[in-house]
Image: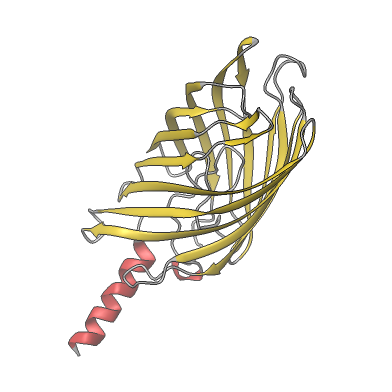
Amino acid sequence: MNRMRLLILLAVLTATLPVLAYPTMLGDTGLVQIPTANVQREATFALGADYLPAKTPAGNTLSLPIRLCYGLSEGSEFSVLISNVGDNTVGVNVEGAGAKIVLIDEELYGKLPGVAAGIRAFRQKTAPRLNAVEGYLVASKVLLARGDNIEEGFTVRIHGGLTYTSYSGAVDADFTKPFIGLSYLHVNSNALVLDYLPEQQVGGVTLRQATVSAALRRRLSDHFWMQVGTTRAFGGNTADTPFAGIIYRYAETNTRADRRPIEY
């Protein structure tokens, strides 16, 4: 009987932990730059935009990445990105799309992590002009959970994986690189996220510098969240700069909580 009560309690907590699906700078659900093993809930979407200044060798410019992430079905999502500012010699102009599918649902109070696989395709129209196709495998796992996460509490999760990136255009190169990140989420959906991407360099050309990104995310209402943080914008010619953004997240109020694993 005690074991049954514990299982029921864990099921209730699993269905009611705080929900936050936030698009990365490339559009898929994740931290600032890296994806997580979660996806946007079925038939819901997140629409986000960020004001992201960029420092380049040619001077200061701007990126306005607008992302849309849509839950296609249980355990899968589709995302698009557009960031066209200025002309192709000055602005940070990037366009792309991606998809992700959950392979293993996370055991929140067990040892099994969540695992997802995804693909991204994007092009950078600012010099050096590049086309990229990227596949990744990512795992996410709760390291620490406190409180009942209904009225009080928080969770800390670790996220890590591998990406295979193939570039064409100004430079032809292939990279297999790891990535890692941490996220803290309070029951009120306020969050702190941190992630790391390693350098991508070939033949003296840096396609991406090693990047540590961080962001503080705050829930403004049932549908709106904002974030402020610092990151290195798209490409290898930019420096770390602060950014700020907002998302609108649509979800039907009568969506049953037990239809999908909780999104963090």
Q: How many marks?
A: 0
- Quarter of the image for residue 55 reads top right
Q: Is residue 77 visible?
A: no
How are the residues colored? secondary structure
| Side of 42 where 86 appears, left or right | right
Up-down relation of residue 74 to residue 37 (above or below): below
| Side of 176 where 89 appears, left or right | right
Residue 7 in the image: state x and y as whole percent: 29, 80
Q: Residue at x 55, y 57 (%)?
A: 39
Q: Nearer the viewer, residue 76 or 260?
A: 76
Q: Nearer the viewer, residue 34 or 202?
A: 202
Up-down relation of residue 52 to residue 61 (above or below): below
Residue 86 in the image: state x and y as whole percent: 72, 15
Q: Nearer the viewer, residue 156 or 18?
A: 156
| Side of 263 where 68 appears, left or right | right
Q: Is residue 12 visible?
A: yes
- Quarter of the image for residue 192 reads top left
Residue 145 in the image: state x and y as whole percent: 26, 59
| Side of 8 where 85 appears, left or right | right
The quadrant the C terminus occupies is bottom left
Q: Nearer the viewer, residue 158 or 259?
A: 158
Q: Residue at x 23, y 61 (%)?
A: 148
Up-down relation of residue 56 to residue 21 (above or below): above
